Image: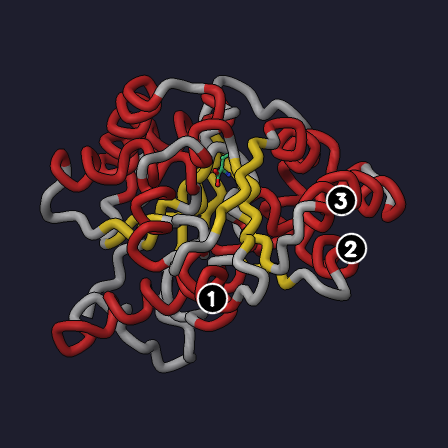
Amino acid sequence: MDSRPIVFLDSGIGGIPYCAYFHARNPGETLVYVADRRNFPYGKRSRSGLAAILKRLVERIVKSADPKLVVLACNTGTVSALGELRKTFPILPFVGTVPALKPALAGTKTGKVGLLGTERTIEAPYIPELASRFGRGCEIIRRACPELVEFVELRYALSTRDEKEQIVREYIGPFREAGADALVLGCTHFLFLLEEFRRAAAPGIRIYDSVEGISRRVESLLDERDSALRAAPAAGGFAGGVNRFLITGKALPETSWQGWAGRLGFSLALLEETEKAEIR
Ligand code: DGL
């Protein structure tokens, strides 16, 4: 049994739906959510620059939180740096997030699958490799949407329902015209707009995401080796320590952070402060 925390890491709020889903299914695990707002947005960074950023960040997290597993709740970080992170931290298990293309390629009838992601994600060699292995001749129509990432990160909390629906409709239109019947949300930020995407896509286009798949992958890693990585079940049902929501950078940039941390029920702090105090 291992009561050390599991870390969920993203450039901002994108990993929250992944962390929340996992938390609901595994309330006994202690979680630390890290929003690397100092380096947001990841999608505009070079692959090597992002790999260097993530190596430094994971090193800081390892020192202050001693995690038993790190979930890279970020497609951009995963396609850019997962391999290097695994090499740099060989005994720390990582779960990466990649666009849910496999089920979309298996499910399409028209042979056209849309993919929305950051610049870095849609140009990753992983995409054509996957298409040639599982694509059965299907076409993957890719679109980079940095504006949608910024919308979610910076304006979502203050936007009206109409504004959210409208921005999503603008993205669905071209895929519909191109004949796609499957659309993959290849950036964790877009999960905040899942319901809007589903409504705008119906009828005819099915939306695919990786939230459940990532949670199941983490759970299966925890349950390997006779559950050695699982937190011990406490008598009161909750085995974990304090769940934390940490932000990189010098100052909390917006008051809405309190709301995001509160949404998960986690306590909010700057990573830097917790490093001084040691979070465990
Ligand atoms: N949420 C991230 C992803 O899944 C990246 C967003 C960004 O920082 O550009 O790709």
Label 3: which secondary element:
helix
Q: Are marks 2 and 1 in contact (CB under 8 Å)?
A: no
Of 25 and 41, the residue lying toward us:
41
N-terminal label among 3 and 1: 3
- Neighbor class of circle 2 (other Cα within 10 Å; few <14, some 14-19, many 20+) is some
Q: Is residue 132 above or below residue 142?
A: below
Q: Is residue 41 above or below residue 77?
A: above
Say which mark, if any, is on residue 28: none
Which residue position holds label 1? 212
Of 87 and 222, the residue lying toward us:
87
Residue 270 visible somewhere in the drawing: no
N-terminal label among 2 and 1: 2
In the rendered image, the quadrant that contains the N terminus is: bottom left
Indicate the position of residue 119 as horizontal and vertical percent values: 49, 27
The answer for how far apart the CA atoms under marks 2 and 1 are is 22 Å
The answer for how far apart the CA atoms under marks 3 and 1 are is 27 Å
The mark closer to the camera, 3 or 1, is: 3
The residue that appears at 53% across and 51% down in the rendered structure is 266
Identify the image quadrant of residue 182: bottom right
The answer for how far apart the CA atoms under marks 3 and 2 are is 9 Å
The residue that appears at 34% across and 59% down in the rendered structure is 134
The mark closer to the camera, 2 or 1, is: 2
**Amino acid type shown at disc 1:** Glu
Label 1: which secondary element:
helix
Asked whether, in this view, residue 225 is left or right of residue 161, the answer is: left
Say which mark, if any, is on residue 200: 2
N-terminal label among 3 and 2: 3
The residue that appears at 74% across and 32% down in the rendered structure is 155
Of 161 and 65, the residue lying toward us:
161
